[in-house]
Each structure stands twice: as C-alpha cells, then as structure tokens.
Amino acid sequence: MLAFVIVGSPLYGADNDTTKGRLNGRFWTMMSATSSSEQKGAMVVKWIFLSGVKDALEEKAPQELGSYIPESLTDKETADALDVFYKVPENLPVPIIWALSVVSLRAKGGSAVEVEALTARWRKRAVAE
C-alpha cells in the first residue's frame, strides 16, 4: 500500500520532491490535509509512511532505529513534529529520514544547540552538490 501511496501519487517524482534520491519535506507537506474533513486521511497516509520507515530500519539497521524513530513519541506525535520541522521553508529540501533524526534528538532531550547543529548539517548536505 505504501508503494501505491508514494508511486501512485501524481506529484511523486517531481524534481523538487526528492533530495539525493530521498523523499523530502516537499513530499511530506503534500501529504497534509487541506481541510478538517481530510485530516484523518492525511494522518493515515503519514502513519503508513512512518510504519514503512520503521519496518525498513528494523529489517536493515535495527541498531539505528532509535536514531530515527523517537521511541517516546506516538506516530501521530512524530508526524506532528515533522509537520512543525517542515514549516520552516529552509527545511523543505531535507529528506524525511534525516528530519526524523532531528525529531528523535529533540524527543530524547537534545539541547537546542545540538538540535540546531544537526538541522544545519542536514540543510547544508541537502543543498550540496
């Protein structure tokens, strides 16, 4: 189903939906509701996306799971934190998986300096050739 959601999207594959081959904040924000009646559907799509990320990490890099998926947050809280992260236009090119590491660091109690340093690192990497 996740493949259908991502590949079936008419907007997937647009030049600005990915950074370094990874889905980014522009794609994430396309999964947002535009009205209150669409809010539940948008959350389901985001939950499916986050479940896919978790499954992939558990399968391929279980030791990294905590670096990208905040254990203390629910999927809804994680999605909400990504929504907040991507409200900053400079963060839109940052791939979702990298943004998850920022959300995880913040959820683990990382200092504002640490969170900003990681965010700046991802911003620079996202625009580097």
Image (cartoon, rainbow, N blue to C red):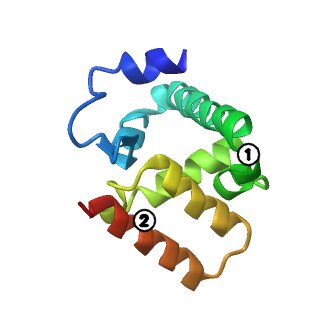
Instruction: Identify which residue is drawn at 56% across, 75% down.
Output: 115
Judge by depth and name the residue closer to the eye, 96 or 42.
Answer: 96
Query: Along the polypeptide, which appears first: circle 1 or circle 2?
Result: 1
**Residue 69's spot in the image, x, y percent?**
68, 50
- Residue named by callout 1: 74
Judge by depth and name the residue closer to the eye, 121 or 12.
Answer: 121
Residue 122 higher or lower than 6, as above or below: below
Instruction: Identify which residue is drawn at 57% across, 54% down.
Output: 100
Q: Which mark is residue 122?
A: 2
Q: Secondary structure at mark 1?
A: loop
Check disc 2 and give the amino acid type.
Trp
Q: Which mark is residue 88?
A: none
**Residue 102's spot in the image, x, y percent?**
56, 63
Judge by depth and name the residue closer to the eye, 14 or 129.
Answer: 129
**Residue 49's spot in the image, x, y percent?**
55, 32
**Residue 59's spot in the image, x, y percent?**
71, 33
Q: Secondary structure at mark 2?
A: helix
Give the crowd class for mark 2: few <14, some 14-19, many >=20 residues within 10 Å. Answer: many
Q: Quadrant of the N terminus?
A: top right
Query: Distance between the Cα atoms at labels 1 and 2?
Result: 24 Å
Check disc 1 and give the amino acid type.
Thr
Using residue 109 as the reference point, say whether residue 38 is left or right of it. left
